[in-house]
Image (spheres, rainbow, N blue to C red):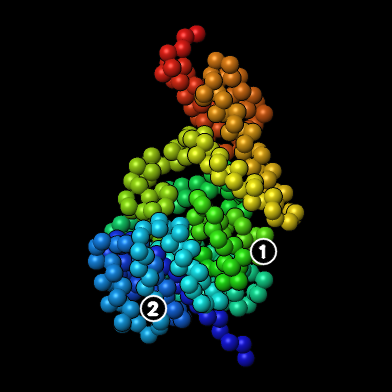
């Protein structure tokens, strides 16, 4: 009879006392308990450490608390914690979510039944800082954030694995070892999502197994109240700004891809980056050099470039407006 896979939870904390107890309680009420929980505290100054230490004494599984001597930031903190895990399957965990009781059991079952799967994602529902459900409109915003506006995400892959946040994932340790170290400035979940397909198959369970809390102090994107208030227009109409921000990451990704073997995934991804660079590069020129490049907006509209995303006409008009506004800001005249 096969031995069950050993499970590690890799958790990072920083001044998390507000929501931490609820997340910890969800670990100990799992239908299949973890074998260990490894926690990296990033120099908390509130009651986080006391909460962790009291909890560690009350649970039937191993808990290791690492107190970082200096603040590492969540990217390097996660890298350090995941490297310390001894389990065959590692579950990254944030400090402010709530896991449903069957999360570990159902996700580990995939690894046990499908040996070629190295990364598993689950579904989630969204809650606010009071634990109340967020609207489906917010869920839609999450679904469009990665594939539409981030220049370093492959669209068809993001559609197959929506959201792809680290807290929704579980990763075989053997895959983690192939992906380390996480190069700066890549976050652990982005790096796993992007590079794991070179080494393994990924799978998503289309069932919510956690409550993903969004509040005003989230470390990750889409956590601030103005994001929710402005809704989808923030990302459709400011996608050029997203491209400007992510362009260095896209170029860095090309360098990493160059060292990887040729495969269908690599070819599709690089083609996607090329399409994004052409489309958004033209839109950048419209906004930055309107007098000489305004015609590129009409060219992108006619060739269908705007129509690869939602709200194409509004985005087209937005680029023209930004280009005209730039002329007046720089003091130019027709």
Q: Earlier in the sequence, mark 1 or mark 2?
A: 2
Classify residue 195 by image quadrant.
bottom right
The N terminus lies in quadrant: bottom right
Q: Which residue is farthest front?
A: 69
Task: Give coordinates of residue 239: x percent, y percent.
Answer: 51, 37
Classify residue 331 by image quadrant.
top left
Q: Examine the rendering and report whether any part of residue 9 can be seen.
A: yes
Residue occupying the point 45% across, 20% down: 326
Residue 199, label in figure: 1
Task: Give coordinates of residue 218: x percent, y percent.
Answer: 36, 53
Q: Relative to 29, does residue 305 appear above or below in the rendering?
A: above
Residue occupying the point 33% across, 46% down: 225
Q: Where does label 2 land, which residue?
A: 63
CA separation, marks 1 and 2? 30 Å
Residue nearer the viewer, 144 or 58: 58
10 Å crowding of disc 1: few (<14), some (14-19), many (20+): some
Task: Give coordinates of residue 39: x percent, y percent.
Answer: 39, 70
């Amino acid at each position: 009879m096969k031995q069950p896979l050993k499970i590690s939870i890799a958790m990072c904390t920083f001044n998390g006392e507000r929501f931490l107890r609820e997340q910890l309680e969800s670990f100990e009420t799992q239908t299949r308990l973890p074998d260990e929980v490894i926690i990296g505290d990033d120099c908390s100054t509130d009651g986080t450490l006391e909460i962790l230490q009291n909890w560690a004494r009350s649970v039937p599984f191993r808990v290791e608390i690492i107190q970082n001597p200096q603040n590492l930031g969540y990217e390097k903190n996660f890298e350090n914690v995941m490297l310390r895990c001894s389990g065959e399957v590692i579950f990254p965990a944030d400090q402010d979510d709530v896991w449903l009781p069957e999360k570990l059991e159902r996700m580990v079952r995939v690894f046990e039944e499908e040996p070629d799967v190295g990364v598993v994602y689950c579904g989630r529902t969204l809650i606010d800082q009071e634990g109340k459900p967020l609207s489906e409109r917010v869920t839609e915003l999450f679904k469009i954030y990665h594939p539409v506006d981030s220049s370093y995400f492959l669209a068809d892959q993001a559609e197959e694995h929506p959201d792809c946040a680290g807290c929704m994932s579980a990763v075989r340790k053997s895959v983690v070892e192939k992906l380390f170290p996480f190069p700066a400035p890549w976050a652990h979940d982005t790096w796993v999502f992007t590079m794991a397909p070179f080494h393994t198959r990924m799978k998503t369970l289309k069932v919510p197994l956690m409550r993903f809390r969004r509040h005003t102090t989230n470390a990750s994107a889409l956590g601030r109240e103005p994001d929710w208030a402005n809704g989808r227009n923030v990302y459709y109409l400011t996608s050029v700004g997203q491209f400007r921000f992510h362009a260095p990451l896209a170029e860095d990704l090309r360098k990493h891809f160059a060292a990887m073997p040729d495969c269908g995934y690599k070819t599709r991804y690089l083609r996607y980056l090329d399409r994004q660079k052409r489309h958004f590069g033209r839109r950048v020129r419209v906004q930055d050099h309107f007098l000489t490049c305004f015609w590129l907006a009409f060219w992108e509209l006619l060739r269908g470039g705007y129509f690869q995303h939602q709200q194409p006409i509004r985005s087209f008009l937005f680029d023209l407006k930004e280009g005209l506004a730039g002329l007046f800001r720089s003091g130019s005249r027709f």
